[in-house]
Image: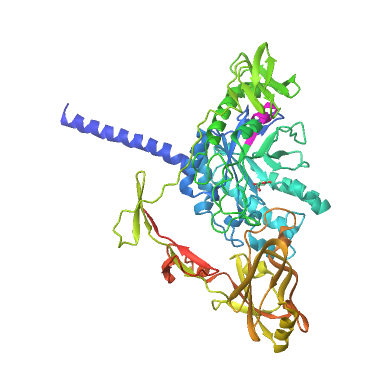
Amino acid sequence: MSFNSMAESIRFFSLQWQILSLTIALLVYFPIVSGSFFKPFNVSYDHRALIIAGKRRMLVSAGIHYPRATPEMWSDLIAKSKEGGADVIQTYVFWSGHEPVKGQYNFEGRYDLVKFVKLIGSSGLYLHLRIGPYVCAEWNFGGFPVWLRDIPGIEFRTDNEPFKKEMQKFVTKIVDLMREAKLFCWQGGPIIMLQIENEYGDVEKSYGQKGKDYVKWAASMALGLGAGVPWVMCKQTDAPQNIIDACNGYYCDGFKPNSQMKPILWTEDWDGWYTKWGGSLPHRPAEDLAFAVARFYQRGGSFQNYYMYFGGTNFGRTSGGPFYITSYDYDAPLDEYGLRSEPKWGHLKDLHAAIKLCEPALVAADAPQYRKLGSNQEAHIYRGDGETGGKVCAAFLANIDEHKSAHVKFNGQSYTLLPWSVSILPDCRHVAFNTAKVGAQTSVKTVESARPSLGSKSILQKVVRQDNVSYISKSWMALKEPIGIWGENNFTFQGLLEHLNVTKDRSDYLWHKTRITVSEDDISFWKKNGANPTVSIDSMRDVLRVFVNKQLSGSVVGHWVKAVQPVRFMQGNNDLLLLTQTVGLQNYGAFLEKDGAGFRGKAKLTGFKNGDMDLAKSSWTYQVGLKGEAEKIYTVEHNEKAEWSTLETDASPSIFMWYKILLFLI
Ligand code: GAL
């Protein structure tokens, strides 16, 4: 080969390489940038199923709420959902996170919805996007931004112009955002279905005719956005003709939508439950969950979503209320940290594989044939022409007796059906799966203790866990939060103000301080009667702490409960401090905008010689939040600002302490 031809071929090779690398770049980069993950397709439906690109489909969906994980976790969660047999991811859209201040939008970090949807598309899964924008979801204020309640004349979730205006603006914003990023299926994106409102049927009656009008308005507003995919309203028996009403619950196999033209969808299969502070941790056995799912497809269902497949964490102050804890683990197949929870995850994976084997028959039949097999046993048989020619047949044999096994005959064969179980026969003969037989391994998660290995003078200790090394401080640091008004940003007002009107939910905490002057006569009156005065409040939520002269007199915890707290005053001037706290704003029910926080009704000091003292007539100094909160001492950037001291085991605790530990991950 001559030098020239060698140079030629090198040039040719490098040109080829450039073309190849461009192709690779297009393959890898193009989908993420353009949102084009699929060949564009349409979604419609008939009475049997969603029709995706012209074909009926049986779909399994995994509920994952993007802000309940970190963006670093998203890919792994989606991959594990796919590996577990999901076809679809389902999420709500969290208005309060996306529009924390009216007109100022946030689509960054945990709220980077576009990124989340693109990751779903790039993994080849579909998305059911539940825009709400009321979502319930054990999310603070049901997903509503708290500024919404300040709009004059507003009433949420009813035929009310100011509310409808804001709702429409937000829903439009989300649909436009998805369309601009080309994320709808007809654009090659993963979105196959949307949702407007959430379980409005539960509260509709409270709103009378206006409620009915609101349902119609919400439906036509949603349809009017031209999103080009079906919309769902869950638990909405009066959903209009062009909207699919869907079931939520522990079992949805008996559910029938409000029209024979609509498919049977199960938008929330509650595979566990949430928890309140001090409450028990609910568990739903994998066998019962699998039974419910199999029964659903057995009796004509075609789309089922696990609420939740991954529950995650309520970061920051996003927990709803009253009193929901920060973990949203939910006993879901993927635990709070995104680890497989076994045997649930594995058992469902096996179930999904069996359902997939039945899919050709399930979509071929317009309806199942029913056969009674015994007093508590029944079969549903799906038969039809397979897509690739030939006949297809799948059957589900159920034993709904909770205690006894049953021996049944089906198609000339004998089958033993375990109690409360469904056997799945993808060819109408062989059992591929029985919901009560768990083949997946049970896993036990262990917590490993730290193994210190640094010199004793160091404040850090080395922790070795498998291949990971990290450092953790040897002891906790502590800081006392000041009791009472702590900073300049306070104000004084004659009267008791409503908690949320003051805090605007920027913090859970609101300090109220007033001066109580006690006479010698009062003191001797209390001595004579052997009784102390009391702070008495008709109704309060969620926590009230009462301090006299900076000493804690007592706390009341409850949701709109009466508070009666005895207090002891000295003769002369006393500082009475009331600290009201919210622990997650109400996220369920009608009239959320009226719920508020803090106190309702009369607030008095009782037991004075001259009668009761109306606290609403006193002059109060207010301060929102805690000092440490305002200074953000809980963040990596700002924690050094505060004067921490080492926590001694015998240190006298204060009612409000901050604790910190340093952790370095390498
Ligand atoms: C449903 C609601 C969900 C969630 C669930 C309980 O009624 O639609 O958003 O709150 O209950 O976890």
The residue lying at 61 percent from left, 13 percent from top is 390
Count the labels in the image. Answer: 0
Coloration mode: rainbow
Rendering coords of residue 391 (x, y %): 63, 14
Query: Which portion, as a residue range, is magenta?
Result: 294-304
Q: Quadrant of the N terminus?
A: top left
Task: Point out residue 403 in the picture as x, y percentages from the top left corner.
Answer: 69, 28
Q: Which picture quadrant has residue 384?
A: top right
Residue 188 visible in this rendered orientation of the protein: yes
Rendered image quadrant of residue 613? bottom right
Q: Toward the viewer: 517 or 6?
A: 517
In this rendering, the answer to whether 196 lies above or below 140 is above
Q: Is residue 363 magenta?
A: no
> Residue shown at 42%/38% (left/top)?
28
Q: Is residue 324 above or below residue 533?
A: above
List the single residue furthest toward the left: 2
Residue 10: image quadrant is top left
In the image, taking residue 457 as reference, residue 525 lies left or right, namely right
* Placement of 8 over or under 621, stated as above or below: above
Residue 286 located left or right of residue 537: left
- Residue at 72% x, 81% y is 526
- Residue 544 location in percent, x, y? 65, 67
The image position of residue 239, as x and y in percent, is 76, 42
Q: Using the image as rendered, state which of residue 289 and residue 319 is in the foreground.
A: 289
Which residue occupies the extreme right position in the image?
Answer: 209
Residue 297 located within the stretch drawn in magenta: yes
